[in-house]
Structures are given as C-alpha cells and as structure tokens.
Image (tube, helix red, strand yellow):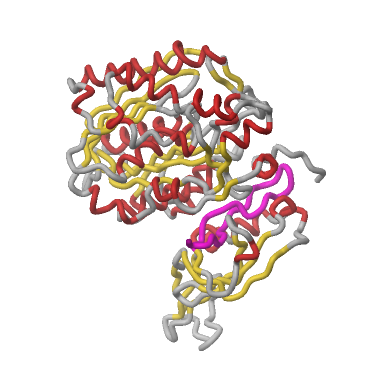
Amino acid sequence: MPSPRYWREVPNRYRLEGAKCADCGKVTFPARHVCPDCRSANMEAMALSRSGKVVTSTVVRTPPDDLLMESPYAVAVVETPEGARLMVQVADCDPEEVLPGMEVSLEFRLIRKEGHGGIRCYGHKAVPVV
Amino acid sequence: MAGIVGYGAYIPRNRITSEEIAKQWGKDPGSIQRGLLLKEKSVPGLDEDTITISVAAGRGALERAGIEPGRVGALYIGSESHPYAVKPSGTIVSEALGVGPDLHVADFEFACKAGTEAMFVALGLVEAGRVEYAMGIGADTSQGAPNDALEYSASAGGAAYIFGKEHLLVDVLETYSFTTDTPDFWRREGEFYPRHGGRFTGEPAYFKHVMTATERILEKTGFKPKDFRYVVLHMPNGKFPLSAAKQLGFTKEQWETGWIVPQMGNTYSGSSPTGLAAILDVADPDDLILITSFGSGAGSDSFVLRATELLPERRDRAPTVRQMLDGTRRYLTYGQYAKYREKIIVND
C-alpha cells in the first residue's frame, strides 16, 4: 500500500521543498542529502518558486488507468528560476500547445486517487501563464 | 480591534454556459438566463476540489498578509464538498500552506454559509487572544443534479481570509448571526446530489434569514444602507440577492461589484466570501462594506467591515477575482462537463 510512501514525500509534493548546496549553490528537487555536483553533505532545505519554464514535453494518449479520464494530457520537464527541474503534468490547456519555453505556474492539484476507496494524492501541476 | 490582514480567492478556469446546459435538456436558454440571471458558471477540473481551491486561495491570503505562515494558529475550512467523508480537508491544506503543525484545524459544514462560519470562528479566536492569526476559508465544488435548476448555478471556487490584530487591511466592526431550523435544502448521508424545496427556498429560507441578519446588524451598528459603499449577499442565483438588496434599500452601485454570480455561478460556501474578495480588490480606504451569507438549513452571518489605508497597497500581491473571471477560460461542451463532474460511470 503506497500511502505511507506518499506521506513521506509531503514536503516536496505539497510545498515544493528542495535543497540547496551551501558550498556550490546547486539546487536539487526533491531534496538530496549529498550534492550531485560537488559531493558536499552541506545541503539546506529550500522551497522552490511556484513558477518555471517548460524544458521539454510530451503528450500522453495511452495513460495509466488512474488517469484515463484526463487523457490526452501533457507531461513536461519544468525548470524553476532556482535551476531545479521537475517532471509534472500540465493542466488547464490543450496538450498540443505545451512546448519548450512556455512559461508556467505550479499549482496545487489532485494528482491521482488510490483506487475507488483509497487516499487522494496531491501535488503540483504546471498551468500555462497567459 | 481584530480584522482581515490577508485575503485570497480562486476560481477554476473551466466554464459552461447556461445556454449549453439548457440545450442539453431541451429548455429555452433565454428564459433560464432571464429567470435566474445566470450567463455561465465555473467548473472544477478533474484535479480540482475543495482542498486545491482552498490552497490556492490560502496562498493568495498569505501573500497579501505578508506574514510567516507558522504564525497562523487556527485554520478552518467551510464546505459542503469536502473530498473525504472521514479525514479533514484542513490537514492537507495546512501542510500545503506550511501553516502547521502547531495550530488548530477543523472542517466546517453549514450548506452555503460554512465559509462565513469559518471566518466568524477565526475572527473570534483572534479577538479572544487565543491565537495571533487565524484563517477561515469558504470553498466548494458544488453539486447540482442533472436537469435540476441547481445545475445552472452549482459551480466551483472559494476565498480565504486571515484575521489578526495588527496591520489590518479591513477592520471588522460588527458581526451578527441568525439561525433557525428550516428544511429548504439538504443532502442525506450517501446521497450524491442535494435536494431542495423549490419555491420554499425563497421567502421562508433565503429571504427571511438574509433580510433578518442584515436588518439586525444595521440596527446593532446604527448604520443605514446608504452609509455603505458596497454590499454582497449570498448568491444562489442572480435574482435572489438583487431582490433582497432592493428590499433592504441598497442600490445597484452598492451591489454590482460583489454580484459576480452571473459569470461565476454559485460557489456555495465560497459564494459571498468570493464576492467580498471582488469588493476588496477595488475598495478605497474608509469604504464601509456589508456581507451577509446564507446557508440552507438555515442561517445567515453578517459582517460590517471598513477598508483601511493598507488595503490598496496589498491587493496587487495576488490575483484579483476579476482577473480570474475575465482571464483565461476554457468553455466546455455538456459532454466534457459531464466527464469533468464525474457524472459518467466507467468500469474500474
């Protein structure tokens, strides 16, 4: 049952909490204990901005069963102003219009439900800024 | 004196017109639009619910308040569409806003007035000195049965208010609550859609409670209708609040700013709080504002408010209600609407 796993990820899923290396400035998301660039263990928690730019994207037309009603939808790698990258679903738009360079905001949304009677899993999705 | 130190609102981008719904059921769109004064309504996406709306509105309120989230000592969410039957919306909203864990949280329910109920209790705790700041939210993804009059109005959205004692955007001068047992609208446990008493929802329910609460708060404060720059009354449809405002002696100039129901629909617990947010988006310092909610079952909460010098400085920190109403919108067909509202049953 994945509920405890989801619960452990609440800081990054709900508040976009990543980490910044106090030595070289590298920002990671989700948070890491060791910097992937300089190997420093001097990582500090930091919340990402709720905005960013699409780096690359794709359109999902054959989704997992949980997301059948949302198909087709776009999934994108978004880079925040801090330099962190995260893969998110893009909501409230025509998926074909999601292209590299698009400005997006990151909004708190329902990501999926654990079946009919399970928990509701929340996190962030990108929404185009018009 | 306690008052509002921050506010925020959220309205989903999806819309369906009254005309599209009327066409589906073979009704005359013109008579619906003229009768209920509803042009379109907001529709939640498949990934939007009371919790996500509360987080969006709450983030706006924190931005405008400019306070450390951890100083919020109480969080109350009023809704009749809490996503869980057992598990509070407030725990998830609290984590997402970063206001916890040292705070008191509760979900409220009182049909369409659960939002002002949350605001009322939040204000009371701050006035009593029990907490430094308290947040009250009214949000809903309203339910309306297909081919029922409610289907033209039941929409989605909400607003959040943070109460405190310093750096007020709005002073709360007085409150008044009026409650009776009136079975005008209800939803039994396990039922998907609410039921209502048709015309019985009018005089003995909406009008009796809205008019009485408003008249009594005017009596309590000594203000006359002409003293107010703005008024917002709960908006179950376009017609009821206009009729009540007229009977109470308010003019179009006073009600038109908060009367957002023709474009937004009835966001139930979020209705009058979102109308109030639309007013705060434009109000000038010293403007007197009156809000009266209505919740079926039935009751009304009234607040008399006065805008401060700080309000115009803070309002640009978060999106305004008009930006959300007039900004990016996606118009849905009835088929898309039925899918988004999960009215279509599919196999697991």
- The percent coordinates of residue B70 (x first, y second) are 37, 53
Residue interval drawn in magenta: A105-130
User: Does the magenta segment cover residue B45?
Assistant: no
Q: Quadrant of the N terminus of chain B?
A: top left
Q: Residue at x 35, y 17 (%)?
A: B211
Magenta segment's dominant SS is strand
Residue B170 relative to residue A47: left or right:
left
Please identify the residue farthest to the right as the structure is shown. Answer: B347
Find out whether residue A119 is within the magenta segment: yes
Residue A73 coordinates in the image, percent (x, y): 67, 60
Q: Which residue shows up at 75% across the image and 59% down it?
A: A63
A4 vs B183, nearest the viewer:
B183
Residue drawn at (20%, 21%), measured in percent from left and top? B224
Q: Position of residue B206 (x, y in %)?
A: 44, 18
Q: Is residue A86 left or right of residue B223?
A: right
- Please say whether residue A54 is visible from this viewpoint: yes
Quick check: can you spot residue B101?
A: no
In the image, A30 versus B66, the foreground residue is B66
